Amino acid sequence: MASTEESGTGGTHPEHAPGDLQSFARALRRANGEINRLVHGFALAQGLHPTDVQALSVVLDSPVPLTPGRLREHLGLTSGAVTACLDRLEKAGHIRRARESADRRVVHVHYVEGARAAARSYFMPLAQAADRARLRFDEEELAVALRFLDALNDELGDLRVPRR
């Protein structure tokens, strides 16, 4: 009997049981490991620390202008570590810091457009792999997968990391 992968329906791996927490945990660890491998490669190529790349992701995905303090809270770093991270990112040309015009004490972190293009170029294989995987599913399945990922991210976002 052919597995769902062999039949071209783009199903699950045989060791995955839908609804089994261990199957979800194993698949999430594997995805996290693969993405971390790519992130570490980008960090190495850019002369950055993997935490710097994590900070870039937060800056990129923030729906509002990001401050160093909010970045510190999100990453669970000390203010000194965030300052060092932002210094490296600024020196490498990935971000710029700008003072808020209404309150000069407030600093916002912005992703530099040219650096965004470099990141897009480096991570294009990741985007292409995600697109190939996405094409294996119909709209209803994708809606469920997105709902799960959104719910998981909400739950994870509620977890607080210990302050350093």
Image (cartoon, rainbow, N blue to C red):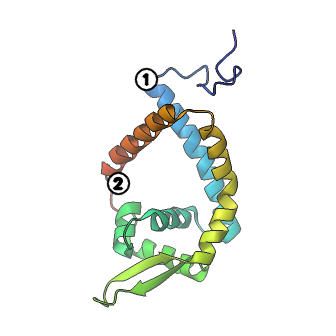
The answer to whether residue 164 is visible is no
The answer to whether residue 140 is visible is yes
Query: Quadrant of the image for the N terminus?
Result: top right
Residue annotated with mark 1: 19
Q: Are marks 1 and 2 in contact (CB under 8 Å)?
A: no
Q: Which mark is residue 39?
A: none
Q: Residues within 10 Å of mark 2 (few under 14, many from 20)?
A: few
Q: Please name the residue shown 46% across and 83% down the image.
A: 97
Q: Position of residue 99 (x, y in %)?
A: 38, 88
Instruction: For mark 2, give the secondary structure.
Output: loop
Q: Please name the residue shown 52% across and 67% down the image.
A: 56
Q: Quadrant of residue 91?
A: bottom right
Q: Position of residue 116 (x, y in %)?
A: 59, 70
Which of the pair 110/133 is nearer the observer? 133
- Count of numbered tags: 2
Label 1 and label 2: CA atoms lie apart by 27 Å
Residue annotated with mark 2: 161
Give the amino acid at mark 1: Gly
Give the amino acid at mark 2: Val
Q: In the rendered view, does 27 fall on the left or right side of 132?
A: left
Q: Position of residue 6 (x, y in %)?
A: 71, 21
Query: Quadrant of the image for the C terminus?
Result: bottom left
Q: In the rendered view, does 71 fall on the left or right side of 15?
A: left
Instruction: For mark 1, give the secondary structure.
Output: loop
